[in-house]
Image: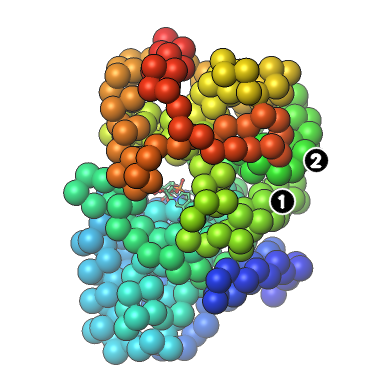
Amino acid sequence: MNELSNLEFSLGSFRTIVSFSKDFPAIPRERSCLVVEDEHTAGLFPQPESRRVIVPAGEEGKSWNTIERILDHALNRGLDRGSLFVGIGGGVVCDVTAFAASIYMRGAKLHLIPTTLLAMVDASFGGKTAINFRGWKNMVGTFYPAERIWIYPNALRTLPERELRSGMAEVIKAAMLQDGELFRLLETIGEQREPLHGLSLNMYEQLIRRSLQVKAFYVTRDLREQELRTHLNLGHTFAHGLEAATHFKEYTHGEAVAWGLYRAMDVGVLMGLTDPSYAERVRTLLTRFGYEEQVSGVDPEGIFQAMQKDKKKQRTLRFVLQRALGDTLLTPLDPALVKEVIARGVA
Ligand SMILES: NC(=O)c1ccc[n+]([C@@H]2O[C@H](COP(=O)([O-])OP(=O)(O)OC[C@H]3O[C@@H](n4cnc5c(N)ncnc54)[C@H](O)[C@@H]3O)[C@@H](O)[C@H]2O)c1
């Protein structure tokens, strides 16, 4: 196999190896292996029927029903704790495969082959697993890092432009958190205003490696999100509000995150906290990548109410803001200010 250099991380008592490969990773032929794909990735990366579980594509795939199907398949084939669960797909497949692996006989082996940019730079790495429950997004899950993540950038060749742009929002967020060089590289790409499909696979590999290094800084120090890891939620509290208010149907995760990054800059500048010239750089970058600064046809109050749902997980709702690139903080906000900023983001 044409393998490039690995990245290796310790996450609590777990160890994750991220391998980059120019060929599709060889999945062990052994009998005790189960492969999860969704309706789209099943056609793109065919696997022997006997060991494969195909789950619905999209958010509806993140359900108890899916987990039961994966567990039934494992049980019917007599798989044990030493068996390998492999997820091939985007964030949805990664989340459900990892959740099922984490609870099967108290933990089976787990490898992930992310096939969207978003899953390569974010969802596959860091150990968060989840399904949606009773209308609440990611409400049930575990922390269970994959032993191995295979990054096969060539998978991006079939990904629709909109999904590439979705993943790119997380790359931009990673740059804002920690990586000024990555931010400048993104500014250069943005200036060219070319379709993301036009970027070379070598460039994607660079963007993915750097984004993973940023995420690793947080998750290796705070796997269970006690405090530091929360910084990765930059833009996400606003994003979750927009996604939930539009029933997870109108916007991709990355589009919502980009909208949330605009809002994080707005709040910071209004509070006199964020350097206005940095906020302007972020806005310009987001606009060059084609993200909407304002959404239309959405009720601002609906977004605000939906954001309160994040309280359920956090107890008090705290927002991730920035003074400048690499200078991040966590703070509660006055609800009136939050409403004002949401209103600015709705046309
Ligand atoms: N666990 C985490 O830390 C974490 C982090 C971020 C996001 N997530 C979760 O990830 C999910 C979003 O992930 P996503 O954006 O990858 O969405 P997704 O998994 O729904 O994939 C997007 C679409 O692309 C298709 N697809 C996947 N690979 C393809 C390819 N190579 N070519 C063509 N089509 C392909 C999928 O079938 C799907 O239709 C959300 O549920 C979110 O909650 C989890």
**For the residue labelled by badge 1, is the local secondary structure a helix, a strand or a loop?**
helix
Label drawn at residue 129: none
The type of residue carrying mark 1 is Arg
Instruction: Find out if the beta carbon at label 1 lies less than 8 Å from the nearest ligand 1 atom.
Output: no
- Could you say which is closer to the camera, residue 257 or residue 44? 257
Residue of label 2: 181
Local crowd at mark 2 within 10 Å, few (<14), some, or many (≥20)? few
Instruction: Find out if the beta carbon at label 2 lies less than 8 Å from the nearest ligand 1 atom.
Output: no
Decide: is 229 above or below 345: below
Identified at 45% across, 69% down, the residue is: 144
| Left or right for 213, reference 105 | right
Residue of label 1: 210
| Left or right for 217, reference 161 | right
Residue most extreme to the top? 347
**For the residue labelled by badge 2, is the local secondary structure a helix, a strand or a loop?**
helix
Q: CA distance from mark 2 to mark 1?
A: 10 Å
- Could you say which is closer to the camera, residue 48 or residue 92? 92
Residue 178 in sight from this viewpoint: yes
Quarter in which the N terminus is drawn? bottom right
Image-quadrant location for residue 212: bottom right
Local crowd at mark 1 within 10 Å, few (<14), some, or many (≥20)? many
Identified at 47% across, 88% down, the residue is: 30
The type of residue carrying mark 2 is Glu
**Residue 138: x, y in percent?**
34, 51
Identified at 78% across, 30% down, the residue is: 188
Decide: is 106 above or below 310: below
**Residue 93: x, y in percent?**
40, 59
